[in-house]
Amino acid sequence: MAKLPDLYVNAVTTYDGKALAKGQKQIAGFEKNVKNLAKAFGLTFSAAALAQYGKNAVKAFAAEDAQVKQLTQSLKNLGLGFATESVKQYLDVLEQATGVNKDQLQPALQKILQTTGDIAKSQEILALALDTAAGSGQDLASVSQVLAQAYVGNNRGLRTLNIGLTQAEIKTANFAEIQEKLLKIFGGQAAVAADTYTGKLNKLTIAAENASEEIGRGLIGALEGLAGSDGNLDPLIDKMNKLSVATGDFISVLFGGKTKDGYSLKDAIDIVFGGGVRGFGNRSLSASNQDTQRADAAAAAKAAAAAAKREKERLALLRKQALTEKNKLSLSKAAAVFDTTRISIAAALRATYDKETILRLEALQAIEEDNGELALKKINELAALQKNADMAKLAGVTQISEATLSALNTQLLTELDAINKSKMAEGEKEAARQIAFGKYNAAITAAGELAAKESYSERVQIQLTEIAKLASLSKTSNASLTLMKLRESEELSMIERVAAAQKRADDARLKALQDYAALLGKIGTGGNTGGLTSSGVGSLIPATTVVDTVGKMAEATKGLKKDINIFDLFPTLTDTQKADLGGYSPTMNYGGGYPATYNIKIETGVGDPEAIARAVSDIFNQSAYRGTSTNRDTGLYIL
Amino acid sequence: MSVKLDGVKETLRAIRKVDPELLKEMNKAIKGIMIPIRDKARGYAPTAAPGGLYNWDEGAYTKKITARNSAFRTFNSEGRLRRFPLYQAEVARKGIYYSASPSKRNRNGWSSQYIVANASASGSIYETAGRKNPGGDPKSRSNNPGAGAHFINRMGPLYGDGKSRGRMIFRAWAEDQGKAQAAVVKAIENTIAAFNQGRYDKAA
């Protein structure tokens, strides 16, 4: 159901009478209870008020008696029963001197005794505890507990005392040092405290309590007497339970009234003590006789020996404890170093992609973890890798292999993916990418260099493209370097392709040049041009060419160079070709058989004589162009 | 100010059990009556600290005001230091809400239903400042004894009667002159009548 806010306006208010009815019922019930309580209280109050002092006195005595018994038993258990009386006296004196109640002193001493087993030492520590408690404002019980623990080397509780020791000092200090420190700080505080007004009041209170205890002791004795049995109150209680009248009489008598029979308390005590029913006269007043003194001395010696032994054991234990602490410290230091090494290895592993480095670090890690088998395995892998690398170097392979590159790519892509998916700020992501690309670059450099991209498998090429894309998106310097490497790898194949094409073109050009040069050489030397003659003698026109007319000769020689003249051509002709020329020789003696000038008269009845003459003239002109005649276009040709 | 109806709770419980749809319809009808009151009250929330009290305006501070650096710090009910709530128009506006759920019984057995409440701290200050002591707290030991009166004067007048005076929800309620309340009661009565009619019809 909703809690009503402080400020609201409401449209409807409803009344639920159940709450009021319930409240009324509860109040009625409460009133009834109060009345009953008042009745009961009224009934008992007068008796309680009357019996208060007596009850308190009896209670005080009972508590004191219980404590004494407890101390006695405790001393007896510790083998110090002989010293019960002296301990009691010591506590009495201490109580009076310090104003600290025996209720506190006794448990404190008991605690210390249980630890030390030595009365003198316990008293010394208790005195110190009193000083410390008075000085520090803490209660005696906790201070004595702390000191008892410190005695056996457990110094943890000393922190609460604020004695100005550091944590480390508290841990390492021995009891003597602690004692000295406490004495220095709190020495004499108990005496000072006892001398204060409060201390004096405490003393007064203690005196009153002691008096009360004494009265209580008397009353209990009296009750025992009334019970009529050997110090046992049970019969009396039975009687009291059975006879309520007797109880009333008892209370009446106890506080000044009389029994139904008219006896007062004084009468009762007179009867008990005067009648000698339960006298104390037979009890010896001397605490010890000669025999008990001897026995006590023997017990004391035994206890002293036991205490000395115990002290020896304690010191040995403390030494052992100190040694253990020292070892523990050394171990923790060693562990810290170990941890540092492990942390360094783990960090180094994260900072590299290089397979060789990774294997080396993994081997180190295995050694740190005492995993010899794994370490050896890693070392073997490392050796194999190094051997492969050496072999590759010997074989002249300097570029990174397909498998290695694939592994590196996968590693980088995984890491980049993790960075992208992380919830880091963009700046932090860039820093992480810088490291990742740095590792990738270093690993590639360590493993050789990237070969041409096309030399790798399609899968690796896809990876490289992906990496290039991611590197171009990142603004880090290492990403730029990676991108540069990948571009170089891409360009490498292009350069090779261009170089190959260039080489092919150059080769073709060279061949053409060589052929041309060979041809030129052959022309220059008049050598065989290859397949032009059947005789093997070089010819500038094919050997099968018939040159028996001027026209055929002109046709056969029209492809020849202009600077080739008849003197070059004629020696290359075959005999048949020479015969076709009708005995012509460039060196023939014109003066002997041939006239110097041939007049050619064109006579024709079919064509235009002028045209025919022009055709002949053209042939001669061409001949002049070829150098076989001179005086071009003159009509007078000289061959 | 509110109308006291006996047995509504029991009747509504019975309606919820027998005819929940009827109850839903009734709540819807009442909501339609109360929401305009809420919106009107929200409209009375000033957009900035009222009366130009810029030091009381949360929006006027560039740094975050905490219990430690607040100039108007105070103590909460447990005795711990607490910042004096600075005025924030949006918080004051949103702090005014409508609720149909019945409140917990008070010690006299009464509970409220269908309320418009003002729950924000600064909104509550604006709503009621000066209602108890129009001239400021007479027991104030402030170094500036007139500050309380000055603050209240800047808030503007209170609307309504007696303890039901205020500047937002009480003002809207007072201005409504009981029309909304009558409509709510009518809606409940109609629902109960419809329910009884239906029940008898079913019985017949």
Image: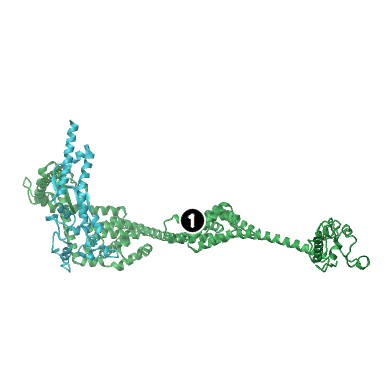
A144 w.r.t. A245: above or below: below
In the rendered picture, chain B carries what hue?
cyan
Chain of the residue displaying label 1: A
Residue furthest to the top in view is B204
Left-right relation of A389 to A38: right
Quarter assignment of residue B78: bottom left
Left-right relation of A584 to A119: right
Quarter assignment of residue A636: bottom right
Depth order, front residue of A131/B193? B193
Residue at 13% across, 52% down: A52
In the rendered picture, chain A carries what hue?
green
Where residue A307 sits: x, y (%)?
35, 58
- The local secondary structure at tag 1 comes to helix
Q: Amino acid at mark 1?
A: Glu
Where residue A73 sits: x, y (%)?
28, 52
Depth order, front residue of A353/B193? B193
Q: How is the image coloured?
A: by chain
Left-right relation of A583 to A323: right
Where residue B143 sits: x, y (%)?
17, 69
Quarter holding the C terminus of chain A?
Answer: bottom right
Q: Please say whether residue B101 is visible from this viewpoint.
A: no
Query: What residue is disc 1 on?
Result: A415
Q: Please say whether residue A495 is visible from this viewpoint.
A: yes
Where residue A496 sits: x, y (%)?
63, 59
